[in-house]
Image: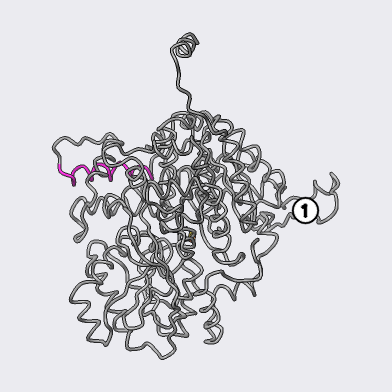
Amino acid sequence: MADKEIKSIDPATLEMIEKAAQDGARVVFERAETMRACPIGDAGNCCSLCAMGPCRVMAPRGKEETVEERRKRVGVCGATPETIAARMFVRKLAAGTASHGDHGRVMAKFFMAVAKGEAPGYRIKDEQKLLQLALDLGVNIGDRSNEAIAVDIGQLLLNEFGKQEGELLFLKRAPLKRQELWRKLGVAPRGIDIEVSEAMHRTHMGTDQEYQHLLNSGVKVALADGWGGSMIATEIQDVIFGTPAPVLSQINLGVLKEDEVNIIIHGHEPQLAEMMAVVSQDAEMIAYAKSKGANGINLAGMCCTANEMLMRHGVPIAGNFLQQELAIVTGAVEAMVVDVQCIMQGLVDTARCYHTKVITTDFRAKIQGATHIEFNEHNAVESAKTIIKTAVDNFVNRGKNVRIPVHKTDMIAGFSHETINYLMGGLFRASYRPLNDNIINGRIRGVAGVVGCNNPRTPHDQGNQLMVMELIKNDVLVLQTGCMAMASAKAGLMVPEAAQYAGEGLRSVCEAVGIPPVLHMGACIDNSRLLIAATAMVKDGGLGDDISDLPVAGAAPEWMSEKALAIGHYFVGSGVFTVFGTTWPTIGSQEVTDYLFKDFEGIYGGMWAFEPDPIKAAHLMIDHIDKKRKALGIDKARERVLYDMAMRRELDSV
Ligand code: NFS
């Protein structure tokens, strides 16, 4: 059972929370105690969309409401609790989609700059993926150079953001049946920006006021994330920086080094981080660090930038979302270099107690009190050098109050869709066939995606660990991204030896293939890899003809961000049962919650659930997987039967 009394299950985190208290540094765990969640907004019962309110429409507790009372429980404009809950929910989906979309857009522009030779220091690394992308998108290959092909691909993908009509190009990657369903329901996104814009308009005061209509439009905007912005970002990053392949590394605050300049890169977009990884090992930079008394430069990641650098360079990870301020509390971090998303403003206040410089680098994101050194992709090497030098110069200011926790764990990451394909089928016959076969024969019961954030409202990393352990024990292969992947890595679940915690069937497959039972697939935008993996399972045959037929389920046991909600909604809209922990933003409206949790199944084949107990949530997923196995007729172990002639004739006559 989850233990609500503890703040974290991670010893390094607990040690640093204590040190923060001794040092008088404020961190998120303490703020979450003093700032309790507002129960009205938390349940989706507060509408703050216009200046007649904010209006609160919570239901009376503990007593049946009369029709008259219910009629009065509306906003000043007359908006019902259902409309309010639904539109606040859809706004969150729009914000999540906008964030992943803006990341994708910046990557598409960057890709064009690289292809045109306007971003020195970067080049196209994965030719095979580039050509595959060209084939997928119908871009002429001929005898043209990679760069010329890339310019055309970049332009096509960039157009996806401003496209006004038609359909997103990557929708065609989904199973045919799913595409038809989206078209029939009118939720196939036309472009990315247009769906975000329409969602903001629909949810403006006085526009869309039928909750079912709103929630279905939410699918449209969320699909523009998963099959749009996120997928574009993943694909482009793979082409420029390389498609991830298995790589060994380490995770947790113990990766910081006492005798080196420690630089943490935190955020989401990998262009700068990639250059930092290269430049930090430059002889000139190392000599500079030595001239200041350090033994070298130690780069470590935080949040999804960490996942990007880990997967492609094996750069170690200092921690996940709730550990960002705690890294500073070690007293050993010279610079916390941030770009966009999931960066707590509290970093600057924590840094006041130590020597750490918080450096913002993105044109869209400044923080009061931080140093801003804007990254320029056209002059990336210089940008990276300036930032690294600033960190090195700060080494002499490191005080005596340094304590780096000893905790760090080995992990293997880099399980992209291509890698799984290869590991399962081999180089010449890469396919998901062996995975499907093992699902059909029951060694693997099903596949679960466990993704998302940490949230101080629930013990750090605990929901993930309990859920993942329960799933693998029950022979469910677990695919992970984001901060939950990091939680499993810290718990030692991302090494092949972790197969010992798996059920007999899953263990035998892991041992035969040589993989951990829990696979790291990347950053949160790389949840698009999970969509591709699910589609590959459908296309390989034997498990139905749509994603909703597969024995799979999704979860975010410790979620907190709007991006996580968008991810969940595009999985549901793609046919996946998805369960969230922590809290649920429409819980204040029974109608809206029922629609998402029950009615959606009849429409999309996938639906939401909310279950804060991670073990119970794991069993909801397992039950769903079993339900799908039954529908596919693979719920019972089947005997192999040798057919004789008479039996064959009988088959032919059917
Ligand atoms: Ni995802 Fe990655 Fe982590 Fe949550 Fe934030 S880092 S994009 S939103 S907190 S998993």
In this rendering, the answer to whether 247 lies above or below 375 is above
- Would you say residue 155 sits in the magenta stretch? yes
- Would you say residue 547 sits in the magenta stretch? no
* Range of magenta residues: 145-161
Front residue of 347/319: it is 319
Amino acid marked by disc 1: Ala
Place residue 36 in its image quadrant: bottom right
In this rendering, the answer to whether 136 lies above or below 251 is above
Residue 334 x/y as whole percent: 36, 80
Residue 85 x/y as whole percent: 66, 50
Residue 169 x/y as whole percent: 37, 37
Judged from this view, the residue extending furthest toward the bottom is 400
- Residue for badge 1: 59
Image point 45% across, 62% down: which residue? Answer: 489
Front residue of 94/511: it is 511
**Which element is circle 1 on?**
loop
In this rendering, the answer to whether 634 lies above or below 228 is above
Image point 48% across, 35% down: which residue? Answer: 440
The tally of labels here is: 1
Image point 20% across, 56% down: which residue? Answer: 118
Which quarter of the figure is the N terminus placed in?
bottom right
Front residue of 576/195: it is 576
Query: Does 248 sit left or right of 14 as displayed?
Result: left
